[in-house]
Image (tube, rainbow, N blue to C red):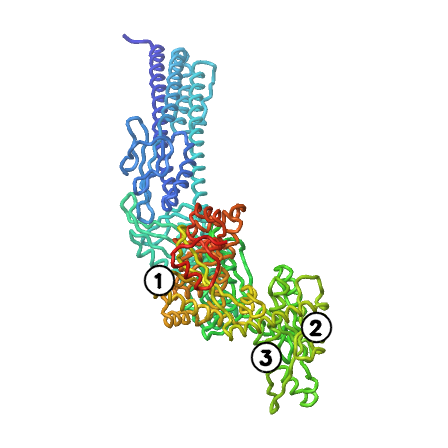
């Protein structure tokens, strides 16, 4: 059956329209889907390649934070599903999104069955694999857009089909024209000219079709706009990556091995190289800026590049014509096509080079200063050992630097200044001060002391602890000598080298202040030479000057180091005596003792050239320390006393106050009598027993007694002091020790007395005598006394000076068998640290604590402490001055089991003690 042409036209038109619209919709949708997928793959590949380049610095330094920042920059892309960076050790250093548990093999780009794009890239630097980058992109955006367009296109196709049926009636009239327009539009759309529009000549189905096609073109245009925005975001990501490379001041590049020309770069080439990325590929443009001396090395490095990275530093001319230092790190590798390429990293190392040159210059200047400066520059560790010394040290001390380093500073300091050095070191090491200045003396290799000014600072670590000290030593020896000479000229008499009037006044003020503080007395001896004017006038002033020098020399050897001898002028001399006895009468005795020595000393003739002359002195004395008098008043008192001595016949000593003069006269008489007593054997030993808690006699203490033919029994406190002051104590002590040992030897020969101990008091001066140990050994040998039964009683005052020597001598005597008791314990200031080192056998509780032990809690506590201490040290303890049974019982309860005192027997002659020894027990005696 034949259809009518109109129907054929209608049917044909409809068929054509259906076919065309369907084809157009399908084709457009297919192209969009393919173009989206292709764009997605290209975008993913480009994005992953750029990310690979941007991640190289972070992976090279294993900087996870930097890698994470790079991934965060691209995490905002709508199609990005995940991105992960794995180092060569397969550790995940940075992640965004949710990556799979394992990445795909490095095989390029893969699309899974869900349409997701997966890319795994190797990240290389100079041919060395740093790690992997895995990224995944979702097709959801592309699929959604394609589906939306498909739905819209299908809808539009259906509408167009409906319109084509209605338009078929008029198709015959306008078919040719309208079809051409439609054909033209379709061709334009296929060609991609989506801005083309089909004119809707009429408001009919064909017009609607034209408008529909135009709408379809508009939708396609919007799709292109969306793609452009995605491209813009991609470009921005690339810019951010380039900014990261600029921040790293590095350029990543890939070059042709044969020519060395860069064919791919990433980074701010304009800033680093002064060449844009577009120009960098031009032949020779970069090499033209390389320094001619460095270009051969650069080319050689490129030619010899291998899988192992190598580096080369070279100078490069910047835009301002200055030379900067660049470093190329280059290695060979294979690209994705298997072709050998050069890959590398270019860094601007100018700051490092400049810093190295500046450091070298600074070290050179530092060495020049250190080696040529006149001051000693030093550094020590926290233990005070030299760690740095400059050549000035060798000039100052004579010690080489090599033999000095590592040795303590104290080895080079004079012994007198060691406490000062220790104080300075403690201030620095304990953080009390950060720097100190002072002056001390160093000992040179030749043994010569050299004065140095010391400046020291401490060096601290991050926690504020002192780890070292550093500073300077300046030689001030000549300055010290000049100062000493100036001081000598200002304060010393040029004739006798003694202090002059100015220094005398200063020292007298200090002595008066010291006496007021210590409550000790001081004294002034004002000495004037008798008949000096006659010698000066008859023999001449030169002889007179020589006499003054000899007088000064004799007196200088007599006074103590703590005293002052000064020349007031002419033939007048003044002596300041310090630290005399607190009691006025005793202090006067001490001053008179020295005065008598001077009288005797200066009474000897003086050899003055060919002449021999006598020149006696007149001495005036006065004490100070009690009243508030001025220096001038004190000197006036001594001057008046001196004139009184001249009025008294010269060659004598007079005190300013008459009553003191009487005391001195009495003491002089006592001394004369005491010397006679020693000579005439008027002294004798008494013995007082010491017993145990059962009353058995364990031993006896030898006590010295003097029976004066006129005075009767003289108290030991009086004549012992005279013996100490006159030096007779050595002779007296020897007599006591020998007499006691003779008695001990006689007891030892009797079987019932052979276990009795003999205690003998020894003075500090006697014990310090150099021959004391030898003297004791000789007495023991000559008398036959058993050393193990001899106990030497020492006082605590002996331990206050030169304790180490005391301990040495005690140990030497202990080896002979001699025992030691510490007498009057608790009344002095002995150190417990020394006490435990002493080879003692006995501690004796002083009678001053026993006297009021029943009524004074303090005395009781002290006694108990001494008993406890003795037990702790493994010593015996003896209580002195026990006079009542109550005292004995109280001490027994405390743990004291040995006693001495009137309760058990007063001191008496040896026969009296021997009567008691016959019974081996004593009673009580009032």
Report if residue 845 is visible in the image. no
In this rendered view, identify the residue nearer to me: 683 or 765.
683
Disc tally is 3
- Which one is earlier in the sequence, the residue at label 3 or at label 1? 3
C-alpha separation, residue under disc 3 versus residue under disc 1: 50 Å
Residue 865: x and y in percent read 46, 49
The numbered dot on residue 601 is: 3
Residue 64 left/right relative to 727: left
Name the residue tied to disc 2.
641
Circle 1 Cα neighbour tier, 10 Å, few/some/many (<14 / 14–19 / ≥20): some
Residue 678 left/right relative to 896: right
Residue 918: x and y in percent read 38, 59
Q: Secondary structure at mark 3?
A: helix
Q: Are marks 1 and 2 in contact (CB under 8 Å)?
A: no
Q: Look at 60% across and 92% down and name the residue there.
A: 610
Residue 702: x and y in percent read 45, 63
Residue 372: x and y in percent read 50, 70
| Disc 3 versus disc 1: nearer the observer | 1
In this rendered view, identify the residue nearer to me: 148 or 365.
365
Q: Residue furthest top?
A: 1
In this rendered view, identify the residue nearer to me: 889 or 915.
915
């Amino acid at each position: 059956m034949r259809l009518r042409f109109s129907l054929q036209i209608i049917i044909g038109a409809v068929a054509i329209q259906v076919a065309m619209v369907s084809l157009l919709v399908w084709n457009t949708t297919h192209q969009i889907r393919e173009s989206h997928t292709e764009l997605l793959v290209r975008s993913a590949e480009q994005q992953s390649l750029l990310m690979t380049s941007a991640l190289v610095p972070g992976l090279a330094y294993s900087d996870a934070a930097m890698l994470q920042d790079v991934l965060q920059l691209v995490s905002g892309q709508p199609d990005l599903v995940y991105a992960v960076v794995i180092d060569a050790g397969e550790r995940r250093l940075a992640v965004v999104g949710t990556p799979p548990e394992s990445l795909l093999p490095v095989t390029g780009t893969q699309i899974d069955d869900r349409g997701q794009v997966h890319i795994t890239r190797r990240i290389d630097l100079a041919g060395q694999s740093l790690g992997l980058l895995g990224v995944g992109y979702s097709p959801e955006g592309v699929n959604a857009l394609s589906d939306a367009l498909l739905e819209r296109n299908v809808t539009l196709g259906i509408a167009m089909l409906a319109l084509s049926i209605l338009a078929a009636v008029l198709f015959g009239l306008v078919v040719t024209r309208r079809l051409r327009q439609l054909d033209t539009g379709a061709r334009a759309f296929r060609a991609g000219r989506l801005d083309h529009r089909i004119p809707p000549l009429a408001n009919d189905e064909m017009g609607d079709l034209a408008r529909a096609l135009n709408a379809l073109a508009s939708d396609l245009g919007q799709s292109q706009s969306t793609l452009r925005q995605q491209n813009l975001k991609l470009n921005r990501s690339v810019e951010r990556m380039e900014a990261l490379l600029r921040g790293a001041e590095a350029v990543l590049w890939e070059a042709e091995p044969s020519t060395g020309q860069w064919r791919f770069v990433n980074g701010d080439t304009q800033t680093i190289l002064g060449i844009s990325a577009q120009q960098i590929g031009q032949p020779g443009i970069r090499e033209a800026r390389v320094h001619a001396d460095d270009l051969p090395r650069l080319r050689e490095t490129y030619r010899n590049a291998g899988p192992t990275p190598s580096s080369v530093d070279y100078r490069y001319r910047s835009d301002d014509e200055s030379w900067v230092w660049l470093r190329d790190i280059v290695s060979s590798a294979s690209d994705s096509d298997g072709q050998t390429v050069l890959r590398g990293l270019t860094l601007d190392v100018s700051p490092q080079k400049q810093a190295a040159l500046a450091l070298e210059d600074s070290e050179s200047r530092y060495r020049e200063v250190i080696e040529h400066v006149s001051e000693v520059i030093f550094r020590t560790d926290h233990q005070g050992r030299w760690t740095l010394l400059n050549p000035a040290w060798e000039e100052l001390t004579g010690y080489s630097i090599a033999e000095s380093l590592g040795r303590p500073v104290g080895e080079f300091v004079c012994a007198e200044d060691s406490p000062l050095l220790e104080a300075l070191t403690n201030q620095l090491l304990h953080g009390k001060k950060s720097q100190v200045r002072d002056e001390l003396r160093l000992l040179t290799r030749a043994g010569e002391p050299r004065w140095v000014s010391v400046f020291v600072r401490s060096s601290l670590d991050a926690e504020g602890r002192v780890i070292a000290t550093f500073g300077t030593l300046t030689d001030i020896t000549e300055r010290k000598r000049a100062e000493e000479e100036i001081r000598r000229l200002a304060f010393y008499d040029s004739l006798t080298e003694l202090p002059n009037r100015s220094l005398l006044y200063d020292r007298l003020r200090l002595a008066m202040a010291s006496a007021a503080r210590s409550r000790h007395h001081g004294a002034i001896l004002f000495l004037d030479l008798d008949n000096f004017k006659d010698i000066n006038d008859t023999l001449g002033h030169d002889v007179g000057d020589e006499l003054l020098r000899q007088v000064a020399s004799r007196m200088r050897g007599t006074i103590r180091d703590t005293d002052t001898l000064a020349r007031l002028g002419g033939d007048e001399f003044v002596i300041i005596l310090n630290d005399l006895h607190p009691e006025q009468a005793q202090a006067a005795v001490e001053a008179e003792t020295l005065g008598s020595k001077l009288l005797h000393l200066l009474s000897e003739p003086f050899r003055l050239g060919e002449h021999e002359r006598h020149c006696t002195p007149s001495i005036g004395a006065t004490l100070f320390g009690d009243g508030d008098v001025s220096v001038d008043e004190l000197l006036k008192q001594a001057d008046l006393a001196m004139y009184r001595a001249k009025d008294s016949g010269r060659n004598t000593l007079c005190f300013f106050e008459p009553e003191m003069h009487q005391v001195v006269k009495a003491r002089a008489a006592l001394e004369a009598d005491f010397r006679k007593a020693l000579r005439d054997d008027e002294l004798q030993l008494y013995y007082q027993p010491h017993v145990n808690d059962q009353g058995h006699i364990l031993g006896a203490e030898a006590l010295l007694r003097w029976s004066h033919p006129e005075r009767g029994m003289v108290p030991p406190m009086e004549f012992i002091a005279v013996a100490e002051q006159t030096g007779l104590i050595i002779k007296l002590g020897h007599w006591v020790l020998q007499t006691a040992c003779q008695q001990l030897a006689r007891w030892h020969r009797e079987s019932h007395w052979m276990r009795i101990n003999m205690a003998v008091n020894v003075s500090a001066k006697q014990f310090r005598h150099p021959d004391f140990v030898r003297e004791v050994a000789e007495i023991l040998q000559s008398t036959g006394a058993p050393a193990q039964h001899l106990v030497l009683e020492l006082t605590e005052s002996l331990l206050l000076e030169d304790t180490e020597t005391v301990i040495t001598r005690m140990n030497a005597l202990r080896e002979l068998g001699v025992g030691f008791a510490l007498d009057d314990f608790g009344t002095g200031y002995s150190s417990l640290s020394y006490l435990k080192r002493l080879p003692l056998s006995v501690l004796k509780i002083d009678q001053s604590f026993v006297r009021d032990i029943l009524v004074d809690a303090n005395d009781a506590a002290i006694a108990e402490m001494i008993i406890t201490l003795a037990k702790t040290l493994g010593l015996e303890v003896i209580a002195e001055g026990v006079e009542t049974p109550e005292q004995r019982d109280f001490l027994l309860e405390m743990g004291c089991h040995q006693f001495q005192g009137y309760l058990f027997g007063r001191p008496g002659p040896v026969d009296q003690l021997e009567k008691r020894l016959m019974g081996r027990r004593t009673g009580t005696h009032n």
